[in-house]
Amino acid sequence: MSDEGFLSQIKWSGDGLVPAIAQDAATGRVLMLAWMTAESLRLSLAEGRAVYWSRSRGRLWRKGEESGHIQRLKEVRLDCDGDALLLSVEQVGGIACHTGRESCFYARFSDGAFTPVDPVLKTAEEIYGGSGDE
């Protein structure tokens, strides 16, 4: 297999994306779901940090480029169907979510609604200086 033959093992979507779940390497907590392209995966492996594809911005997104909350890459796994990645990361600063929480999965379903159950560790203003949109 060539140096990048591993990319052919991934079932990319029609638009060249694959979902990537970021999981805290120390605790196992699921931090976020993002999307990767072949280029963002190559860059993540080369740089040792999570680089995603931002669908809203239409460009590569180095996690933490604005907030400083980078994800140091520890391990990458491919699921049994070849259509999803699991990134084991060290979450710098303990905040993965642009809302200032540890995880993007902070709302729990109960009594017919999703309710935030995890605390905001830093406000968007403290992180981004007002934009709040990493």
Image (cartoon, rainbow, N blue to C red):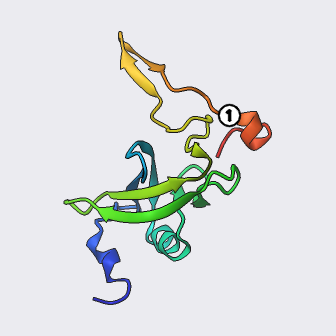
Quadrant including the N terminus: bottom left
Q: Residue at x 27, y 73 (%)?
A: 9
Residue 2, given in percent of the width and then of the height, sits at 33, 90
In the rendered view, does 81 fall on the left or right side of 45?
left
- Residue 76: image location, x then y, percent: 37, 65
- Visible residue check, residue 106: yes
The residue drawn where x is 51% and y is 26% is: 118
Residue at the left extreme, as displayed: 80
Q: Nearer the viewer, residue 66 or 91?
A: 91
Residue drawn at 57 percent across, 44 percent down: 94
The answer to whether 43 appears left or right of 10 in the picture is right
x and y percentages locating residue 133 in the rendered image: 66, 42
**In-image side of 26 versus 83 (left or right):** right
Could you say where residue 103 lies in the image, as x and y percent from the top left? 49, 38
| Amino acid type for the residue under numbered disc 1 | Lys
Tell me which residue sits at (31%, 57%) in the image. 84
Let me know if residue 51 appears in the view.
no
To which residue does mark 1 refer? 122
Q: Is residue 72 above or below residue 55?
A: below
Of the pair 39 and 119, the residue shown nearer to us = 119
